[in-house]
Amino acid sequence: MTILDRLRRAAATRPARGGLSAGGRRHSFADLDAASNAAARVLRARGVAAGARVLLYAGSSLEFVLAYLGALKLGAVCVPANPAYQRAELAWILADAEPLVVVGERAGLERVRALGAPSVRALLEIDAAAAAPCPSAAPAGPPSEPFLRAVQAASTRRLPASTAPDDLALIVYTSGTTGRAKGAMLRHANLEANSDALCAAWRWTADDRLVHALPLFHVHGLCVGLHGALASACETLLLPRFEAAAVLAALACERATLFLGVPTMYARFLECAGAAPPALPAMRLFVCGSAPLAPLLARRFRAAFGHEILERYGMTETLITLAQPLDGPRRPGTVGLPVAGVEVRIAGAAGQDAAEGEEGELLVRGPCVGPGYWRDTAATGAAFAAGWFRTGDLARRDARDGLISIVGRARELIISGAFKVHPREVEEALAEHPDVVEAAVFGLPDADLGEAVAAAVVLRPGAPRDAGALTAFCRERLASYKKPRSIRFVASLPRNAMGKVLKDRLAR
Ligand code: MLC
Ligand code: AMP
């Protein structure tokens, strides 16, 4: 049963109970089903049909959910993207995915217009309070229209179903090894398989109450959070952003039973609650993923909140493949066992199975693993080895209990607050600055973010050592979370005999 079938079933069987609260209003599943029919009609009237791409360039909101479900109902392919992406990041996604319609917030739509994306026929604005067309000085592109107003004016009558399990549902751009994002493709069947497996593994039911504070533009918030909410038909509070005090208050007053977070969120809960963590008597499960959860943080959280966090592991390309068991043991530092239907291998350097307890690259296979990268057969070919997806993460399986630990990364990637930053992208941005000769970017341990982006920079002779100016320069070119949080000026970069920069030495 696809995510859309689940929504329709929830609407039919629980027309009033359950649903999604967002922006201060509660929407039953029947409301969501009807309004997403209207959203589908709005998109269809602007040319969207099966296979067309719809860029969702926005944070979490009801409109995001409606645009997403509406597009899927037409058999279209959704491309969620972080609204923090700046010109170059956006330009690449527009060029590669060629969306027909962009749904986004005003600042983002202005960026799209300024780029004059040739594929884009309509811009639908989220949160257009004035409901007026966006006055724009930008040279190209269609005018933007208020999305919600169009949805409210459209018929809510159901459209003929036009999705099959093998149809593409999502292209999610993910930080590539080349510094250029790759579009990970996911089919309806992948979404369904993972959502079914996680709902069963976590006994997620219609009696649950979820506080959802993750961005919907990543698979964690979208495919774990939103899909789980729809598949289980539970009650969900969708928050536009994570703010520790507000989320803790919501967990208490909503009598939440379930929360999905990234390690930084748990670190902030601890910091915010201090010596007086709120009582959360209804809570049954805290889940964490998207970045390594430090065992010390898991233990401190347990001591303060009385809950053992359930850690799970995944990737955009594969969805969630490993999870600690609901019924324990949840040994901190491990990510548990394969979820239902998933097989894993740990491969040694020559591709052979690593010996029990030995470290190697984690390979996964199963119905939740997507078919590869959009319009990139070379990257797709490189990502699979005889049908197994190569995660690029290093793992070890404990010989005693079979629990798997993620012990490192074979590829260069910084994981900062569960956002992924490829060093090369930041190095290229820094290298564009006229005062910079070269730069090396790497992660440094950070109590809040897990890792923080750092840079070592070689300046031209006589150039001012102005870290603030270089940071500002990066912020103009890249999503702000990618900017270096610390910059060290060095006379030269340390290199090995092959000329490779020794980042380990810089990070010391
Ligand atoms: C925000 N900022 C960050 C940052 N998040 N900087 C570094 N790393 C981060 N993760 C910066 C902003 O650019 C801004 O900088 C400043 O911090 C304040 O912004 P904010 O929006 O107020 O941020 P904040 O609320 O602090 O965000 C923290 C956070 C967020 C933890 C809520 O990072 C977040 O939502 N992370 C979740 C990411 C996620 O969902 N990943 C899943 C990927 S899917 P300035 O200078 O402009 O003010 C995946 C597969 C799987 O991994 O297994 O799930
Ligand atoms: P993304 O590119 O955003 O899909 O991120 C996927 C990456 O996040 C994985 O390849 C891992 O490196 C990392 N990741 C996700 N979950 C975990 C986890 N529980 N522990 C360690 N790393 C994780």
Image (cartoon, grey):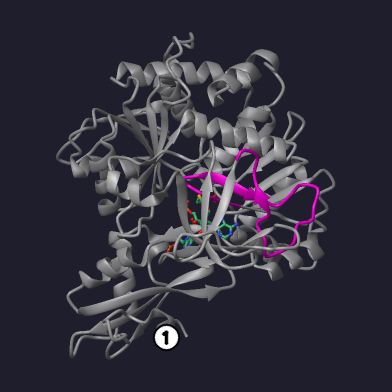
Q: Is residue 22 visible?
A: no
Q: In which quarter of the image is residue 112?
A: top left
Q: Residue 167's x, y, as percent?
A: 41, 26
The residue lying toward the viewer, choosing from 216 and 147, is 216
Label 1 within 8 A of ligand 2 by Cβ: no
User: What residue is at 38 percent from the left and 55 percent from the top?
Assistant: 175
Q: Residue 332's x, y, as percent?
A: 72, 63
On screen, residue 26 above or below 329: above
Instruction: Specify whether 508 is left or right of 327.
Output: left
On screen, residue 91 above or below 121: below
Residue 333: in magenta span:
yes
Q: Quadrant of the N terminus?
A: top right
- Secondary structure at numbered mark 1: helix
User: What residue is at 27 percent from the left and 88 percent from the top?
Assistant: 492
Magenta residues (range):
313-341
Residue 105: in magenta span:
no
User: What residue is at 60 percent from the left and 68 percent from the top?
Assistant: 358
Amino acid type of disc 1? Arg
Q: Residue 329's x, y, as percent?
A: 79, 56
Q: Can residue 354 be seen in this view?
A: yes
Judged by its main secondary structure, the magenta piece is: loop
User: What residue is at 69 percent from the left and 68 percent from the top?
Assistant: 295
Instruction: Specify whether 337 is left or right of 388.
Output: right
On screen, residue 430 above or below 315: below
Q: How crowded is mark 1: few (under 14 residues within 10 Å), some or many (20 or more)?
A: few
The residue lying toward the viewer, choosing from 467 and 181, is 181
Q: Residue 16's x, y, as percent?
A: 70, 18
Task: List the residue tagged with mark 1.
Answer: 505
